[in-house]
Image (cartoon, helix red, strand yellow):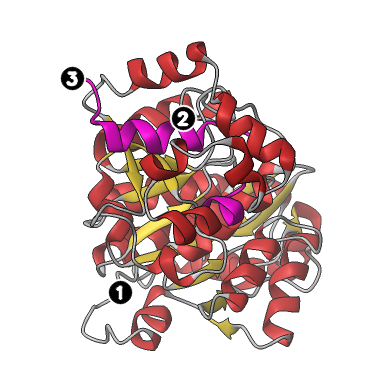
């Protein structure tokens, strides 16, 4: 089914690369509708926008680019949401630079559901991934759709947690929705399209350009009531998302970590700057007024006594076998056997370099 004339006008303007969201909104304020803007001549446009932008609007997008988008919209799973739609996310209207048009694959209703951003390092530790997935699962069951950026590491773990809960997950991507980036997340992208949603402000065919990801990050925080950072180095892109969240008046939460881990430095910096320290999902839900939800907490009280001793001495910082043996008074063979059992039970992770870490 072909789009109506209004949607077609939205698309024609959205596909003009020179037309930034700021200028697009300026023209909408002046002339009311995309159809009215498309009908303007160069001279009228040039009185409002730079000459190059005016010329690009008059010229319009390439026919091939428009045809590709129209063909994409023939799939019932694909849609565009504009300022004119009641389904446009209300929280995005509060930020300083909302995109006039969003491309959506999946269920667009999730975009306007109560949401929380969960972000962090691409090179996350096993413990960080486990934390992100557990937080996201419980927050999703607590009524919040999990928003993240579909990157490797914490983002992917957060999406999996959100999808396994009651309120699903939304991925905001920095490419066109006809591109899966990173390619290793193709299966995750398909699952998000079926059970949640993927959203982008970038036209189809837009590749993974470095400059696009900070723009994506402002939408991750903009769609959300708060932003949880699970693991982050000092130069992590997730700190950009946290900064946008603060600028947009959202709550920022951070999970503390080992003082020895570079991936805790970013979270600790946020905590020093006033982010709320959280140890479990209940901390976030109570802060946001959802106090009745009961967090799933797994008890280890039934573990064998020897296993408890190893766990107690292991702690939550990475530790190598020799130091653990010294602390426990065990032989390497006995300690290795206990660690293997605990690893199979899912309470200990084996890390690179022959180290071990307790799973929180």
Q: CA distance from mark 2 to mark 1?
A: 35 Å
| Residue 177, numbered label | 2
Q: Secondary structure at mark 1?
A: loop
Image spot of residue 341 (x, y percent): 49, 47
| Range shown magenta | 1-24
Is residue 149 within the magenta segment?
no
Question: Do the residues bearing badges 2 and 1 touch, measured as CB atoms within 8 Å?
Answer: no
Q: Is residue 45 left or right of residue 191?
A: right
User: Disc 1 marks which residue?
Assistant: 295
Q: Quadrant of residue 294?
A: bottom left
Q: Sequence-wise, which precedes: disc 3 or disc 1?
A: 3
Viewer-proximal residue, 131 or 206? 206
Q: Is residue 66 left or right of residue 108?
A: right
- Of the residues tagged 3 and 1, which is closer to the observer? 3
**Image quadrant for the N terminus?**
top left
What residue sits 66% from the left and 32% below the top?
A: 55
Image spot of residue 127 (x, y percent): 58, 56
Q: CA distance from mark 3 to mark 2?
A: 20 Å
User: Disc 3 marks which residue?
Assistant: 1
Q: Vertically, is 150 above or below 112?
A: above
């Amino acid at each position: 089914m072909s789009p109506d004339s209004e949607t077609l006008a939205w698309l024609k303007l959205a596909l003009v690369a020179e037309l930034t969201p700021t200028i697009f909104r300026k023209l909408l304020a002046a002339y009311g509708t995309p159809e009215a803007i498309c009908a303007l001549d160069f001279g009228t446009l040039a009185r409002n926008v730079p000459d190059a932008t005016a010329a690009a609007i008059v010229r319009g997008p390439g026919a091939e680019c428009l045809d590709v988008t129209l063909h994409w919209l023939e799939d019932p799973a694909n849609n565009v949401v504009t300022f004119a739609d009641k389904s446009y996310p209300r929280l995005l209207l509060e930020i300083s630079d909302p995109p006039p048009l969003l491309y959506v694959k999946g269920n667009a209703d999730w975009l306007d559901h109560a949401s929380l951003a969960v972000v962090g390092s691409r090179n996350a530790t096993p413990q960080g991934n486990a934390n992100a997935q557990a937080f996201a699962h419980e927050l999703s069951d607590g009524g919040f759709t999990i928003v993240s950026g579909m990157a490797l590491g914490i983002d992917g773990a957060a999406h999996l947690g959100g999808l396994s809960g009651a309120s699903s997950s939304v991925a905001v991507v920095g490419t066109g929705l006809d591109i899966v980036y990173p390619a290793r997340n193709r299966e995750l992208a398909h699952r998000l399209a079926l059970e949640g949603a993927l959203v982008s402000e970038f036209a189809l065919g837009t590749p993974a350009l470095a400059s696009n990801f900070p723009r994506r990050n402002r939408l991750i925080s903009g769609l959300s009531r708060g932003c949880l950072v699970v693991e982050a180095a000092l130069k992590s892109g997730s700190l950009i998302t946290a900064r946008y969240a603060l600028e947009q008046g959202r709550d920022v939460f951070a999970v503390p970590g080992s003082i020895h881990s570079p991936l805790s430095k970013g979270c600790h910096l946020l905590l020093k700057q006033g982010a709320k320290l959280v140890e479990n999902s209940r901390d976030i839900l109570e802060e946001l007024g959802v106090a009745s939800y009961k967090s799933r907490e797994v008890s280890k009280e039934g573990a064998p006594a020897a296993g408890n001793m190893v766990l107690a001495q292991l702690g939550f910082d990475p530790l190598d076998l020799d130091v653990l043996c010294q602390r426990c008074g065990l032989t390497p063979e006995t300690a290795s056997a206990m660690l293997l059992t605990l690893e199979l039970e899912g309470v200990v992770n084996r890390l690179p370099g022959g180290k071990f870490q307790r799973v929180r």
